[in-house]
Image (cartoon, helix red, strand yellow):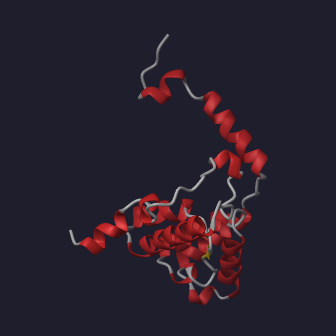
């Protein structure tokens, strides 16, 4: 492996030696992707998100779908505008409409998909139409539904499917 490619794989914290940053836990940050202790942390977080979207562009379909489901469009000093994901592969475009309630950039992309459907793959347009027809839940409703699912799970489910009594 070349020195250049190994530098890309180093964790962010090793990119700024000699500097001790007081890092707050995500609970203290309130899960706000724009809240950072300093500009350097915000810069590297933004670069990481940009790299994630670059991987989503070139990855296989399974990884593309996963990345499109979890990558934020805004973090640190970087914002992925609606125009950037508009050029993504069909798998990514089909996964994004379900996140329109989370990120305004994705909501803009979905609006763009409806306005200019001829520019987008059919599968992505179908996904946007299906996502639009689904009732949206508030953040509290989604958290309550996840908590209910966790409570309703069989006891042994989390330990590899073995039930204990």
Asked whether the viewer can see residue 75, the reply is no
Percent of width and height locating residue 104: 72, 71
- In the rendered picture of this protein, how many numbered marks are placed on residues? 0
- 77 left or right, relative to 92: right
Q: Position of residue 153 (x, y in %)?
A: 58, 29
Q: Is residue 53 above or below residue 24?
A: below
| Left or right: residue 160 compared with residue 133 | left
Determine the residue located farthest toward the left in the rendered image.
Answer: 1
Which residue is painted at 49% across and 68% down in the image?
48
Residue 130 visible in rendering: yes
Quadrant of the image occupied by residue 106? bottom right
In this rendering, position of residue 17 left or right of residue 25: left
Query: Which quadrant is home to the N terminus?
Result: bottom left
Q: Residue at x 29, y 67 (%)?
A: 6
Where does the image place residue 113, in percent across and percent down from the top left?
A: 65, 81
State the residue at coordinates (61%, 85%).
83
Between residue 32 and residue 86, name the one nearer to us. Answer: 32
Q: Residue at x 49, y 75 (%)?
A: 90
The image position of residue 2, as x and y in percent, is 22, 72
Is 94 rendered above or below residue 120?
Answer: above
Q: Judge by depth and name the residue closer to the eye, 54 or 45.
A: 45
Question: Which residue of the protein is positioned furthest toward the front in this rendering?
Answer: 18
């Amino acid at each position: 492996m070349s020195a250049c490619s190994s530098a890309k794989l180093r964790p962010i914290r090793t990119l700024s030696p000699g500097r001790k940053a007081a890092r707050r836990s995500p609970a203290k940050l309130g899960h706000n992707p724009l809240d950072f202790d300093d500009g350097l942390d915000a810069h590297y977080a933004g670069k990481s998100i940009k790299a994630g979207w670059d991987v989503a562009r070139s990855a296989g379909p399974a990884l593309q779908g996963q990345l499109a489901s979890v990558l934020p469009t805004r973090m640190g000093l970087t914002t992925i505008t609606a125009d950037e994901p508009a050029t993504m592969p069909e798998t990514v475009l089909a996964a994004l409409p379900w996140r329109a309630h989370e990120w305004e950039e994705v909501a803009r992309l979905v609006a763009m998909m409806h306005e200019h459907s001829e520019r987008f793959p059919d599968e992505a347009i179908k996904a946007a139409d299906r996502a639009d027809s689904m009732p949206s839940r508030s953040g509290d409703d989604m958290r309550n539904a996840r908590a209910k699912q966790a409570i309703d799970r069989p006891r042994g489910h989390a330990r590899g499917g073995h039930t204990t009594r």
